Structures are given as C-alpha cells and as structure tokens.
Amino acid sequence: MVTVLPILDRKLLRDLRHIAGQAAAIVLVVACAVATCVMSFGVLRSLDQARTQYYERYRFADIFASLYRAPEPIGEAIRRLPWVAAVQTRLVADVAIGIQDVEEPLAGRLISLPERGEPEVNAIVLRRGRSIGSSNADEVVVGESFANAHGLVPGARITALLGQRKRELEVVGVALSPEYIYALGPGMIAPDDRRFGIFWTGRQALEAALGAGGQFNDVGVRLKESASARDAAREIEALLEPYGAGDVHGRERQLSHAFVSAMFHQIAGVGRIVPAIFLLVAAFLVHTVLGRMIETQRQHIGLLKALGIGDRAIGWHYLKLVFILSAIGIAAGLAAGTILGRALTGLYTEFFHFPSLHYGQDPASVLGAGIVSIAAMGAGALRGVRGASSLMPAIALAPPAPAAYGRTWFDRVAPRGRSGSAARMILRHLGRWPLRAALTAGGLALAVALQISMLFSFDALDHMINGYYARAQAEDFTVAFARALPNAAADEVARWPGVAGVEGYRALPAQLSSGGRGRVVNLTGLPATSTLRTLLDTKLAPVPVPPQGLALPGKLAALLEVGVGDLITVQPIGSSTRFKLPVAQIVEQYIGLDAYMSLDALNTLLGSGPAISGAYLLIDHQRRAEFLRGLKDNPLVAGISERSVVLDSFRDTMLRTLTIIVSFFVAFAGLTAFGIVFSSARIALSEREREFAILASLGFSAAQVRGLLAGEMAILVALALPLGCLLGRGLSWLIVQRLDTELYRVPLVISLQTVAIAVLVVVAAAMVSTWTVARHLRRMDVPAVLNARQ
Amino acid sequence: MVCSVRGLTRIYRTGPDEVHALRGIDLDLLGGEFIALLGPSGSGKSTLLNLLGGLDRPSSGEMWFRGEALTRLDDRALALYRRRHVGFVFQFYNLIPSLTARENVELACDGAERPLAAAEALELVGLRSRMDHFPGQLSGGEQQRAAVARAIAKRPDILLCDEPTGAVDSKAGVQVLEVIERCNLELGALTVLVTHNSAIAAMAERVVSLADGRIAEARRNSLRRKAREISW
C-alpha cells in the first residue's frame, strides 16, 4: 500500500492536468471569494484600528452637544457629573472664508482652541507648523485637506467674515482632527476639500468676534469607561436645555463617525455576502467537475479497489484533489486580496483623513476565508467522494447502465426533422441531469445578480442627481446670511451684480420630537410660491409647500414614528418656544434629514415678522465671476454653495469609488460565468463526444455539431438570465435596506442599461467559454470515438 | 462504378512513431455490389472503410465517388457527401441515446433526396413495434438493427458496415446480417462489410482480404451463402 499511494498521487497530478481548464475555473472562483473577503476585512480592520487609535490618542468625545450659548460655569457643572472623565467647551461658527486667487467665498468652520494647553477633548493632530499662540488673536490652524487643496502653508493669509467683519488671519499650522475624518460642509452631500475647511483659532479671539465672552456653544465630553452614553447624554441635555441645547448625542450621530461607520457597515456587508456567492458557485463547480471525473474513472476505481486499496484511501484520493485546488485558490485569493486591499485603502485615504492609514491583513478573516473555502469545496465534493468510496468493485468494473432518457413536454411541440432532433437531444440531455442543469443556471443567475446588485449603484446615483436633485433644486446658488434679515433683504440681494432671480428662505436648527423620540434637524421655511426649491413626494412628483404643518422625509417620519396628520413638537434651537405642528406631507429626501414648512407659517410661529436667513439665487452665467467677487466681500454672507458644484462633487466622489469597486465585481462575475459555462461545456463535451461523432458520421457539419453544444449552453444561459435579474433585484433590495440610514437612503432603481450590461457580460463570458471548449471538437478523432467500446 | 481508389495510404503519427495503416490500395467498387473486407486486427480494413465513408482523409492517393475526387473536398463538402450518399453501421451501434429509434432514423434522413419513411425503414429491419423506444430500452441486436435502419433510410449509394455483428451474440448477428443482405438487394446500395470472420465474408459477392495495409487477395465468391445459413 505504501508504495502504491505515491503512484496514486502521480495519477492525481495527471488528472489535474487533464482537467486543467476546469481546475483553473474552480481556482479562479475560490480566489475571487478569498480575495473579496481578505480585501474587505483587511480594509475594515485597517480602518477600524486606525480610527480607534486616532480616537484614543486625540481624545475623541463620547458625547457631543451643540447649543445656542451657555455660560462657562455650565461646562463646569457638566464636569462635575459622576460619569464624566473630561469636558471641553468651545465656540464653533460657520463662516465665509476668502483666499487670494480664489474668486468665490469658501465655506469654513471656525473652532476655538483653549488659550493654553491642548483641548481636553477632540484634540488636533498638528501636521505642519505650530498651534496658535496665546497672544496673537489672528492666528489660525487650518485643516490639512483644505490646506492641501489650496496649497496653504504656515505663513499664508486668509480672510474670514466674522461677526459681519472681515478679518485677516494668518495660517500658523496645518492639522487633522478625529472629528473630521470625513468632512462635510454645510449644504454639502459629499466631501469637497476645496470648498470646505476647518480652522482652529484662539478661544478669546472667537469670543470677541462673536460677542460671546465667557460663553460656549459646543461641548465635547469624554466619559468614564463604565458610563452609559445614553444616560450621560440625557443628563447633559438636562443641564444644557435652558441654553438652547441642540442635538446632544453620542458618537453614533456625529457626522464624520456616522459616515465612517456606514462605510464599515457597507464593507462588512460586501465581505460577507459576496464571498458566500462565489463559494456557492465554487462548490457547485467542484460538485459537477469531480462528479464527472469520478464517473469517467469508474472502472479505474473498481480496478484500484480490486487491487486492495481501501474505500477511505479512494475517497481521500479525490478529496486531495479538491484540497489542492482550494489551496491554490486560497493562495491566489490572498495575493489578489492583498493587492486590492492596498488599492482600496489608498482610495479611502482620499475621503477619510487619518494621521496614518495602512492596509494590513486581518488574520482572523484570512483564516476564516481559508477554512470556509475548504469547507465549501469539501461540501461540493462530498457526493462524488462518497460515491467513489462506496462503489463496489464488481459494479465499478462493469460498464455503467445506459443513460435512461425519457420524453419531455417539449416532444409535443418540437418540430420534426433535424432542428427538432437537435432541440430534443439538448432538452433530453438537460432533463437527464436536472439538478446539474439547475445548478448551472443558478450559478449563472448569481453572476448576473451580483453584477446588477453592484451596477445599480450607478442608476441610484443617476436617479438621485437627474431624477431627484434636478427636480427639487433649480437654483444656481444658495446664500446663507450671517443672521436672519427682514424680507426686504431679498430685494437687496436681487440688486447684487449678476443676480437674475431670488427666493428667500428661512432655515434654523430645530428639535422635532414625538412620544419621547426626537431629532435635531434643519427646519426650512420655503415661500408658498417657491419655484427654485420644490418638494417632491415619494414618487418624485412635485407637491406644494404645505400652508400649515410640516413636510418630512419618510425616514424622519419613521424615526419619530409619525405619519400624516400626527402632531409633533417643534422647538427651535436657542429658543425656549415650543409649538405643535401636524405632519402635512411626506416628502422624498435621499441625503440628510430636513424638515420643511411654509415660510410665512414659520415666521408667524417665531413671532419675528417676515424674515429670511438666506436666499436661493439664479444668476446670469455671463456675470458669474462678477457675482462671486461681490459675494466675497459681502458682510451679509456667511456661506454659499453652488448647486452644480455640490452635485458635481457628489457625482465625482461617488463615481470614483463606485467605478473601481463595481468594475472589480463585474470582472469577478464575468470570470465566474466563464468558469461555470466552461466547466459545463467541458462536461457536456466529454459526455456527448460519441453523440457528436455520430452526428459527424451522419453528415452534420462541424459548425452544426458545435451548434448543438452551444445550444445546450444557450438554454442554460437563457434560463439563468431572467432568474438572475430577479435575484439581482432581490439582492439590490437587500443592499438598499442595509444602506437605509439617517445619513442617506439609496433608491432602488435598476436601469435597462444595468440589466443589459449584466446580461451581456454573462452572455459574452458564456460565448467565449463555449467557443474555447468547442475548439476541442475540431481535434476529435471521429472514427476512434465511433469504434470505441460503449 | 460508384467508387474507386488508387494508391491509397494512411499513416498515423503518434509522437515520433508512424503507423502505416494502409500502404497503397487500388480498388474499384461497383453499384449494388456486396463486398466483404476481410482481415485480422490491424490489417487496415476499418481504416479503408472510414476513408471510403469520408470520415477520414488519406495520407496520399486518390479516391473518386461517381467521378468526383473525394480527396479534394473540403470538410463541409465531405460532410455533405456523408449526409447524401453514405450510410454507416458501426460495431457499437452508435445510436444517439437521447433519441428514440424512430428519431435516430429521422435524424439521418434529413437532407436526403428521397428517403424512406422512418417507420418503413424500421419495418424493413423488423423493429416497427419498438420504434418509439430509446436505445437504452432495446437489446444489443435491436439496437444494431435500428442502426441499420438509420443507415439505409436515406437510400444511400454506399452502405458501410464495420464489424456489424461484433458486439452482439450470433443469433442477433445473423438477424443483423439478414437485414443488411435484404437492404443490399432491395435498395441496391453498394455494400461494404468489414469483418475478420471468413464465415461472414462468404455472403459477399467479392471478398477483398487485407493484410498489413495491403490487399493480399481479391476473389469472387462462386457460391454466395445466404445470411441465414451462416453460423459462427
């Protein structure tokens, strides 16, 4: 026995060479599974570790609160709370920033730093230069991504409109902050490093500029380890409530943290779902390829058993083959996953700003991917291996029973003659092994579904931009004023150079609550006759601004558990007034959560008389530069955003990430489809070689014989396509559910183009693989096949 | 004259080795004639049959079918030649397992000028009652008779039978030979039967013996035996 087994191993290697194409297909699919897993969890672990270390080292807060203004002793009161480990009060203000050589004003967020020492909470990472000095009020440290976008280095000068006064500030340092790993400016839906920057300046300077001596409007709190964030937030909220507490929340609603976490969630989803799909396909391929191999080697198995080799040794012999393929697939997947992981990490560094981010393997997922792959392959091999080991030698040595064919429903409708015969042969052959046909079609359907579930992101993006934003927003610019102004301000804005149309609005942060559930959102009052901003219902049909009551996005209504007609409590931040308003309309909003109501109704409730806090503008595009120059020096303006720039930046950001990730999965799906069809065609060829030779002897041309093989593959593909489209829709729906967060919602839109690409990739892969296999027919020795014993 | 071959050779190359299966064959075959190719294993008789049927190409030499040089036909034309003019009966039946006996016959008739109805062809071989059975449901002898029906249904000019009794018992074998004999008589096809069994060769008009790739002997049977008189 000892001397026989190495010979068996030699046979194994020859067998492998014999099924090289199919083996390669299996290895490829396993590699895709392992690569996806290694990439996803490696990236996830790298990001998570980087974030955890960053948070710890730079004391990222556990609780965040924004408020109107509170005196400093309130900060001390927070510090005295039993669970509190550290507190940092500060002033935060959104301002318009001016940079020489940049024609338009840019959005900036000024954050105060303590005059002495580092902040106790939410410290900054100084990357270049120094921090602000205690004596000079005009010094700022600028966020690294904004600094890089504009080439700002220590010594550079910028201007900021602070308290309606333009102030010149000197950049003394460049820094990063754990609060802005993902930095979104006001009104933005994607990061734009050029148009939004973070600036840190001295507390006293900011107090003076804002007229807020001894006060703060923002506080970060770090809790002791045993503390409950929810209870702590509630207590802090109670302390801050008289001072117009806005949103007091834990990390889960801190914008940057929430976006990064949402990305983690997505990566983990891909890492779990996609490898499972690939492994399912790999198991199926092993099942069919090994099954066929054992079928053809039936008599060899009988002979080996007759020579005294045991059942287990035979089973192990075939299992070894599967393990060899698994090992190669795992190794290839590990290598590819590492390369892709590095590339993806590199891509994320464009959007996520960490002091350092390096891709590293996640040993647990590497091990897990390896074990699960081997288990999946083993499961695929189980039936074949069990069959081989339990085969009685006498039975194995006898020729197999002839294949039992039967009539199908197709016989009643099939035409007679050559084409009918060909169709009958194909269908009866498929019907002879229905499970295999179903698995092949199922595998191909998964390849279609996987692509649709990835490609539909482009449709969703297109729908958001061209379906939603194109209808909801018609303005060129949105200008936010430094404070609320009388309605007449709109007339003044209309006189600004280049302005072609104006519609005022009033926006303020407000706490919306119902039955103990609450959210702080931006409440915007729109004129009843608004034409530049249009509310859209859930079918994206325009709806008028409700004269009374609120229009809420469906997600916000769901979070508050309210529907049309329900009353909710609205409390503007910084005000002690509360009023109850009914929900009048559910509207669609894909990014962020905002509430809308009539401008007149809002002003009436606020008791302030007609006022606006900003305006939507149409401009004369010929005079754009003139318009922007005017804005830059305008003390009324606290912030501007240009609709086309916001949307372009959103589109570009999304496309950059999506294109790479989606192309990668489309390629994987194509390779998988190739592998499935190749393996299936190869098996069909080996099983039907005699049939093809008979047809050749009857005068069928080579093309006609190849057509028969192609016909079988075509039927499987044709079965797979509609199933794949349905599965793709289901998978996309799952993804949409997974992405449904307070930050954004993704519409489930699948375009014809997406379906066409998914279908074409699979059809093309099937054609190429069938063609590759059909070439073998040319080399077929017809007389030898016909004269071989059946 | 239906077929004639001149200087036909066939060399198989397997790696560096060359196997000379045919070493120069000259032969004329007449319409309606019944010829037996006799010889031991490896004598080249099956190779010659495959060349006559257009299943293979010679290494050198010429072949004509009704004056048309078969050696100059491309693959497509050769396939057409097989479809229109040649009927094959193989040792191992070679029926398509996923088609019934009738469908196997119909498949071969497609493209023929005036084929027999499938039922008629199966009647000729005594299989009309089992024509809707799949090959797996037929005995070896029945399968071989179905294969003969498939070969003759197109009314071929040449019926080529390669050891048609090799895989069946002698009783079934005699039935198969009877069918071939009857088809030769009734349809008038040139019939070439390959056998290593001289008893079977006795039913042919002419016996061409091959040895080592050459024609060793060609003789006319002065007394043809009926198939039913043959036993082995």
Image (spheres, coloured by chain):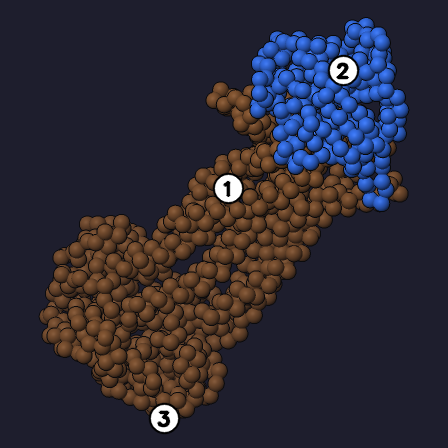
List x then y, in percent, for residue A467: 30, 55
Residue positioned 53% across, 62% down in the render = A44
Find residue A136 and name its label: 3
| Looking at the image, residue A333 lies above or below residue A622 | above
**Residues beneath discs 1 and 2 located on the same chain:** no
Residue positioned 84% across, 12% down in the render = B221
Q: CA distance from mark 1 to mark 2?
A: 57 Å
The amino acid type of the residue labelled 2 equals: Phe
Colour in which chain B is drawn: blue
Q: Is residue A55 left or right of residue A522?
A: right
Find residue A445 and name its label: 1
| Looking at the image, residue A171 lies above or below residue A96 | below
One can see residue B27 in this view: yes
Q: Chain of mark 2?
A: B
Q: Along the polypeptide, which appears first: circle 3 or circle 1? A: 3
Q: Chain of mark 1?
A: A
Disc 1: CA contacts within 10 A as few (<14), some (14-19) or many (>=20): many
Number of numbered tags placed on the structure image = 3
Q: CA distance from mark 3 to mark 2?
A: 119 Å
Disc 2: CA contacts within 10 A as few (<14), some (14-19) or many (>=20): many
Colour in which chain A is drawn: brown
| Looking at the image, residue A342 lies above or below residue B198 | below
Q: Nearer the viewer, mark 3 or mark 2?
A: 2
Residue positioned 14% across, 71% down in the render = A611
> Residue A228 versus residue A59: which sits nearer the camera?
A59
One can see residue A421 in this view: no
Give the residue pinned by disc 2.
B34
Q: Chain of mark 3?
A: A
> Residue A434 versus residue B161: which sits nearer the camera?
B161
The amino acid type of the residue labelled 1 equals: Ala
Q: Is residue A227 left or right of residue A46?
A: left
